[in-house]
Amino acid sequence: MSKVYPTPHIDASPRDFAKTVLMPGDPLRAKFIAENFLSGAILVNNVRGIQGYTGTFEGARVSVMASGMGMPSMGIYSYELFNFFEVENIIRIGSAGAINPKIKVRDIVLGMGASYNGNFSHQYRLPGTFAPICDYKTLDICVKTAEELKLKYHVGNILSSDTFYNDEEGLPENMKSASLWGKMGVMAIEMEAAALYMNAARSGKNALAICTISDHLLTGEETSAEERQTSFTDMMNLALITAKKLDKIAQGENL
Ligand code: HPA
């Protein structure tokens, strides 16, 4: 596809974005991050209220732009950023519901793989089933950073679900989707990572999903507003330091 600006969903030019973009689902969160975690952030996109900002974090140029909710929305924005705006790395920063007894609310999960229950991969016409995975280098940097920050984190498979509300009332617990995916070792459910990983794979770029656990689908446990804020701040520090390290590596520095 030829590169014309603005694209259907992003009214900006490639130089407006940093090589690494952090993507929360919520546009207001993108604004909050820009105002509270970045220096000198400027608004670079606001089409459909999907706010995108570029600023610096400890000297590294970083962008933050919302993905919206669900694989189609993440699919559109990550496609345009990777393919039209020369973005190299996208780090999703979101929330997820735990489906594994080992995972607790407020923990951080890093999606090494992202299973899915939708049809996003059908566009590739593969003669088999695709396994979306994160970028190993980004994951490695992120894990080392989580260790340095002494955060409680888990690395493994997450599920990108096309539905938040599932018509499972009356089904025995062990037949519900959370239980079935949990039996496969899947840690938590969110709604975007698999689309991000597939777009990264197809365009030869890098992606990672970092999620905080906001609720537990097996125990019903939820986080308070204050706890959500603390775990959000932990996740932001983790994502921003990871982005800074990616920037340093791109500048040729040895970490
Ligand atoms: N399902 C999908 N996405 C989510 C959930 C959930 O239960 N919790 C937080 N994000």
Image: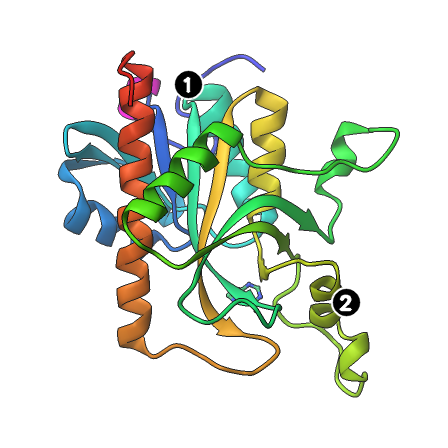
Where is 174 relative to 8, above or below?
Answer: below
Q: Which residue is depicted at the point 54% across and 83% down? A: 220
Tell me the mark number nearer the camera, choosing from 2 and 1.
2
Residue type beneath disc 2: Leu
Regarding mark 2 in the picture, which secondary structure is present there? helix
Q: Position of residue 221 (x, y in %)?
A: 49, 82
Where is 182 relative to 253, above or below?
Answer: below
Q: Position of residue 204 (x, y in %)?
A: 57, 20
Q: Residues within 10 Å of mark 2 (few under 14, many from 20)?
A: some
Whether residue 185 is visible, yes or no, is: yes
Q: Nearer the viewer, residue 155 or 93?
A: 155
Q: Which residue is depicted at the point 47% across and 37% down? A: 139
Please give left or right for residue 143 compared with residue 149 in the image. right
Residue behind mark 1: 86
Most common SS among magenta residues? helix
Whether 16 is among the magenta residues is: yes
> Magenta residues, as a range?
14-18
Regarding mark 1 in the picture, which secondary structure is present there? loop
Task: Report the colour scheme.
Answer: rainbow
Please give left or right for residue 162 compared with residue 232 in the image. right
Q: Which residue is depicted at the point 34% across and 79% down? A: 224
Q: Position of residue 142 (x, y in %)?
A: 39, 40
Residue type beneath disc 1: Glu
Which dot marks residue 148?
A: none
Whether 36 is among the magenta residues is: no
Task: Indicate the quadrant of ligand 1 in the picture.
Answer: bottom right
Where is 38 relative to 27, above or below?
Answer: above
Give the residue at the far right of this rendering: 127
Whether residue 9 is visible, yes or no, is: no
Residue behind mark 2: 180
Please give left or right for residue 205 compared with residue 241 in the image. right
Q: Nearer the viewer, residue 56 or 103?
A: 103
